[in-house]
């Protein structure tokens, strides 16, 4: 019930900001999207000998409740996870980068959700087969996973792998995203996900790192 209430509160706030209620307190971004290429950071194998990958999608530019950011909220959480568990990271990048402007981006994301689009992504991850566990991170967009993440999930085979979802959000929490991921990766084992308020990543990263560490410990990582 609390979850539904939180989602409703966010939806009301989000509609106001996304539909023009937002005034000039968030300056238009002059940042260009990060270059559209694959990033893979090699790190040691996790202590339990299992190979772990942290896959994430994240956006820079003008963002909900944080002004203009140069490192995405989800990217920050992804880095914390990778550091704690000793994982490689892989960033999903849309072939056509999402707009830096918040309102433009929300409008586009809404159209994509309504049409259940599958936007293309740049470069796939190398040798997914070598990983036992894949953390999958994303921002909540309109109460769902960004459609480009679904394109990525559907383009890969996660059969037999353990998937651990995590998201950043403006109030919705994970919403129905664990179900979306389970549907896109039918033969994977899904662990309990983590939801972090996006603003915290920018304002209080040390506190976020602690929350991430506690969650990972609770899952046995
Ligand atoms: C297109 C778009 C749609 C969003 N929709 C929601 C939403 O439905 N619920 C929510 O809590 N936050 C929503 N947000 C806020 C983001 O989930 C939040 O700011 C997140 O931390 C952004 O992560 P990122 O910097 O990694 O992209 C939305 C943001 C954008 C840009």
Image (cartoon, grey):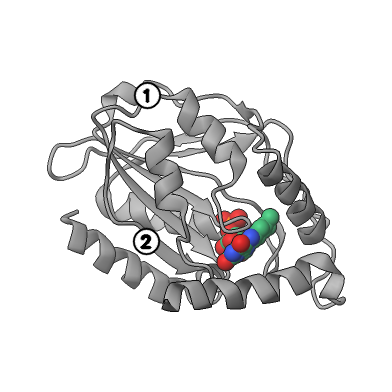
Q: Within the image, what quadrant is residue 143 found in?
A: bottom right
Q: Residue furthest front?
A: 1
Against 96, residue 212 (above or below) is: below
Q: Earlier in the sequence, mark 2 or mark 1?
A: 1
In-front residue for pair 108/7: 7
Residue found at x 48% / y 61%: 175
Residue 139 falls left or right of residue 220? right
| Left or right of 62 in this view: 23 | right
On residue 53, the disc is none
Where residue 118 sits, quadrant-wise, is top right
Q: Quadrant of ligand 1?
A: bottom right
Q: Quadrant of the N terminus?
A: bottom left
On screen, residue 3 above or below 182: below
Residue 135's x, y, as percent? 36, 45
Helix, strand or loop at label 1? It is loop
Q: At which x and y percent is residue 162? A: 26, 39
- Residue at figure coordinates x 27%, y 64% from the top left: 215
Crowding near the residue tagged with mark 1, few <14, some 14–19, many ≥20 C-alpha atoms within 10 Å:
some
Q: Residues within 10 Å of mark 2 (few under 14, many from 20)?
A: some
Residue carrying label 1: 157
Place of residue 182 in the rendered image (x, y in percent of width and height, measured from the top left): 37, 41
- Secondary element type, mark 2: strand
Any part of residue 171 in sight: no
Residue 216: tell me if it is visible: yes
Who's the residue at 80% across and 60% down the image? 103
Please give the name of the residue rendered at 45% of the width and 44% of the height, measured from the top-left corner. 180
User: Could you say where residue 39 lies in the image, as x and y percent from the top left?
Assistant: 51, 35
Between 164 and 130, the one nearer to me in the picture: 164
Relative to 44, residue 213 above or below: below
Question: How many labels sit on residues?
Answer: 2
Label placed on residue 194: 2
């Amino acid at each position: 019930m609390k979850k539904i209430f939180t989602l409703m509160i966010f939806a009301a706030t989000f509609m106001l900001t996304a539909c023009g209620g937002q005034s000039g307190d968030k300056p238009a971004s002059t940042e260009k999207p990060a270059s559209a290429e694959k990033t893979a950071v090699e790190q040691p194998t996790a202590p339990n000998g299992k190979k772990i990958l942290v896959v994430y999608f994240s956006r820079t530019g003008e963002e909900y409740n944080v002004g203009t950011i140069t490192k995405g909220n989800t990217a920050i959480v992804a880095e914390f996870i990778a550091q704690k568990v000793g994982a490689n990271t892989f960033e999903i990048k849309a072939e056509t980068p999402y707009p830096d402007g918040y309102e433009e981006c929300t409008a586009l994301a809404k159209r994509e959700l309504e049409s259940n689009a599958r936007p293309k992504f740049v470069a796939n991850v190398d040798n997914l087969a070598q990983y036992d566990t894949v953390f999958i991170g994303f921002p909540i967009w309109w109460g769902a996973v960004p459609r480009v993440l679904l394109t990525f999930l559907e383009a890969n085979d996660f059969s037999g792998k353990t998937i651990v979802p995590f998201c950043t959000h403006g109030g919705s929490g994970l919403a129905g995203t664990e179900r979306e991921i389970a549907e896109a990766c039918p033969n994977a084992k899904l662990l309990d996900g983590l939801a972090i308020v996006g603003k915290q990543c920018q304002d209080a990263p040390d506190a976020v790192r602690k929350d991430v560490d506690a969650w990972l410990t609770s899952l046995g990582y």
